Amino acid sequence: MNLAVYGTLRTGSTNTGRINHTALVFPSHQRFPAMICDSNGSGTIVEVHDVDDKTLADYDDYEGLSAGVYRRVRMDIIMDDGTIIEAWVYLAGEKILKKSASFAVIPSGDWFNR
């Protein structure tokens, strides 16, 4: 299954695309980003990785799903070649969204170009 990653999980893969109507932000710290839905956002650059169920469950633990740090949803990705695929992606969860007043937007939407 496809998993789209945008921040510290990126490896430099060339299997990249964009998720429109989102913004990449730094929550109240500057250690790792979060993606939020934003109809006026510049979009978020993602890498798409093929993962199995166990790997996805491991990422869920790492991303703090059970604690509400992130939430995992399926979204459309516009790949660099123009094709559209669906992938799991982590959006800011309740714990991060509580700090939305302190978000700093990454204008490029690209963790590697911040």
Image (cartoon, rainbow, N blue to C red):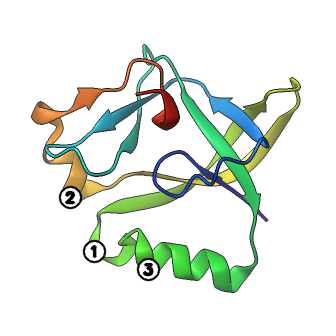
Q: In which quarter of the image is residue 103?
A: top left
Give above or below for 76 relative to 94: above
Q: Do the residues labelled 2 and 1 touch (CB within 8 Å)?
A: yes
Residue under pointer 3:
61
- Tell me which amino acid carries mark 3: Asp
Mark nearer the N terminus (2 vs 1): 1
In the picture, the quarter occupied by the C terminus is top left
Measuring 65% from the left and 30% from the top, which residue is drawn there?
18
Give how far apart the Cα atoms at labels 2 and 1 are: 8 Å
For discs 3 and 2, the disc positioned in front in the rendered view: 3
Q: Which residue is tagged 1?
A: 67
Image coords of residue 82 (percent x, y)? 86, 23
Examine the rendered structure and indicate whether residue 79 appears above or below residue 73.
above
Q: Which mark is residue 30?
A: none
Q: Which residue lies furthest to the top in this view?
A: 40
Q: Is residue 30 left or right of residue 4?
A: left
Q: What's the residue type where badge 2 is placed?
A: Lys
**Neighbourhood count class around disc 2 (C-alpha, 10 Å): few under 14, some 14–19, many 20 upward:** few
Percent of width and height locating residue 1 = 79, 65
Provide the residue designation for mark 2. Answer: 95
